[in-house]
Structure formats: structure tokens, C-alpha cells
Amino acid sequence: MSNALAIATVTTALAQIVRSAVQSVVTGSDVHTGRPDPNATPSHRVHLFLYQVSPNGAMRNSDIPTRAADGSLVTRPTVALDLHYLLAFYGNDSELESQRMLGAVVRDLHSKPVLTRQMITDAVGSQPFLSSSNLSEAVEQVKFTPIPMSLEEMSKLWSVFFQTPYALSVAYQGTVILIQSEEGAALPLPVLMRGEADRGAQLLLGPFPALERIHVCAPEDADLRPRPQSYAGAQLGSMLILSGQNLSGDSLTVRFRHPRLPLPKEMPVPENARTANEVRVTIRDDAAAQTEWAAGLYSVTVVAKSGSTDRESNRVPLVLTPRIKNISPNPAQRDAAGTAKLTIVCSPKLLPKQSAELLISDRVASAEAHPASTDTVQFVLKNAPVIASALTRLRVDGVDSLPFKRQAVPAPPRLVFDDRQRATIQ
């Protein structure tokens, strides 16, 4: 919010932008903040005139109501305004000075349409009467946009300047200027006690757990600050950090449901891996996990057990991506018909009814039939392209593998493309 000097500050800052623009094309030109005047000096100049101030339609009622029923002030009233400026250009017509100045102004206002805090600070420092302006602290920054005007609208606007000949001009709108009242509202009294015996608010619906998001990362990166960006999907061996509310109880279990697995997968959460707002579990990556888990889309819930009562949270989606562990032969040779065959070893194992596709270069190949769960699938690429070290992706039930790996050395840890997932076809 800003004080009553905001309008004058915006005009001064805009004048500095216009002055810099016109002086870059016409040496000695200047800016006058006032009504158009054909007799002013110098002969090449711009008149910046604030011809209209209107309420901002989007924010004019954002602070209603400002007073209580007894008339006392609840919040400081704020008026939201739009400023409408006319820029009239004067110069030597034989050298097209007015047109050159207009072009420079339009260029600069289009490339930098926002009044930055530094621009406002410079404007305040240039005029002693603006020393008390606090526009630079306003939350909303002022933006300038051109106002399209027809010939009729432009003629009506110039008609308000009595006996002033028309000059080449353009109109701009500055929005939004928030001017706050100097009258202050009474501060509320501090809270001394929250409910009986200061026990806090009582939840009438019960403390049901609620999940908000799942962060996927490597177990080694879980305690890094700032926390690395979450992976697009989990893999066997990934750590899941579940965030939410009321994630507490005598015991806690994370439940995973997959449409192709007959029973949900449940993972108990140790005491040292949970708080009321965060739960950490790691998906194992061992021989048993290859068959207990399946790539695809899971729904994840948290089950909090208190006494004999189980409370289950809302469901949050989680993608478990397949991992390409080996590609053979590599390089692969095309036969006389241009066909190449690739064998992919993946993790976890593919279920019999799961679809699998190999994405390589600009080609997509479907896996050969696999009637039993397997970690080895065959792909036949007809009219295979000649490629060298192309990254491949394995798509299982619409879920793509992640083509990167974590590299710890040199520090800090970072993600790099995994060369084991590159294939060459000759």
C-alpha cells in the first residue's frame, strides 16, 4: 500500500522513462508534465498529461467492509486507481522528430512495462516534494499498457484542450495504484487462552489423517537443505516423504494399492521416521521386491491406529517407474530387412498382463508376449534407424522409466543421464 504521493510518484517515474527514450533518438528533447502546449520550449519535446483517474474495476471493492456495525474502523480503507496518460509529441515535422520520439517511447514502454522499485526510488530522489512517498514498498507494481483509441475518441479527448491544435499523441494506462488511508484501525487484543484450560481447538469431526503430497528422492538426499526437487516418479530403492496433517497414532502404516496386484502393499512406519506432519518410508530394492511390486500407478494412503480404531487418510497418486538395468546386444545389428532385436532387463518384474513398449529415437516398439512374470523382455524394431548412444525409455502400463541416475561425486549430488540406458543400432 502507498500514501497520497503515489500518483505524483508514478507520473515522475513515467516522465523519466519517456525522457530517456526520446533523448536516445532526438538530442536535446525533453518531457513536460502538463497539458499540451504548442508554444512551449524546446521545440522538440513530449507533454505527459494525466487526463483521467478512474477506479480499478478488479480491486475497487477488495477492502469492503472497512468498518464494524458501530462505525469503528476494522481495516484501513484502500482505494484502487487506474491512471490515464496522454503523451503528445512535438518536433520538426520535416525531420519526423515527433514520430521518432513516439517510436522510442512505445519501444521502451513495451519492453519494460512495469515500474520497478529502483525506478520509483530514482523518481523519489529526483524531486524533493516526493521524499515521503512510499510507493516503492507497495505490493502491487504499476504496469503501463497502451489504450487503443479510435479517431472519434481521440478527437473528443483533444477537444477538452481549448483552442489547442492536435499533435501526434498516444494514450497509456497505469494500473494499479493502491492508496491507503492514514487512519489506523485498533489492534485486536492478544489471545491469552485457547479454549478451556488452554487445551486448544476441539475437532468435532475427529483427527483424521490427511495426505497432501509425496516427495520422491534418494535416501541419501532426504536430509539435504534445501531439499532437492522431487523425482517425477519413484523406483525400487527410492525414499518417499509423505506430508500432511494428523499423521500420528499408536502405530502408522503406509498402504499402497495397485490395480494389477490382488492385495495392497503395507509398510509399517518406525517411530523415528514419522512426525505429525511427515512420514518417511523407503521402497526396498531386493530380490523379494522384484515380485512384490509392479510398475504403474498406485494410490497411497496412511492408516493411523489409535487403540482399536483405524483411521485411513485420503488417497494420493504415486507413479512407480520401471528401471532399465541392461540392454543387449549393444550395439545391435540390423539384418538384411533392416530389423533389429533388443533384449531389456528391467526392474521390477513385468506382470503377464502388463503392456511394455520401448521408446528409442523416434520409434516405439511393443514387447514380445510374456505369459509369466519376467524381468527380461524382447523387442523387435522393424525398419530400425541407425543410431549411436541414444537414450531409451521403457514404458510399462503408460509409465516411463527415468533415464537418469544419481551421481554423488563430485559433491553436491546431481542427476546425470544413465549410460546403461543408451543403445546403439548399426
Image (cartoon, rainbow, N blue to C red):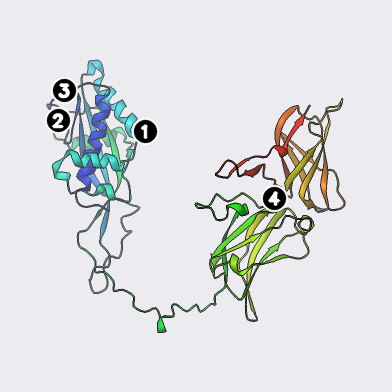
N-terminal label among 1 and 4: 1
Instruction: Measure how far apart labels 1 and 4 are at the Cα level.
Output: 44 Å
For disc 1, the marked residue is 111
Q: Calculate the distance from the C-alpha at mark 1 to the C-alpha at mark 3.
A: 27 Å
The residue that label 3 is drawn on is 43
Tell me the amino acid under the disc marked 4: Thr
Question: Can residue 81 be seen from the camera position used here?
Answer: no
Q: Which residue is mark 4?
A: 321
- The picture places residue 124, in percent across and down from the top left corner, at 20, 42
- The residue type indicated by label 1 comes to Ser
Q: Are marks 3 and 4 in contact (CB under 8 Å)?
A: no
- SS class, disc 4: loop
Cα separation, mark 1 vs mark 2, equals 29 Å
The outermost residue toward the front is 410
Q: Could you tell me which secondary element the residue under label 1 belongs to?
A: helix
Q: According to the image, label 2 marks what residue?
A: 37
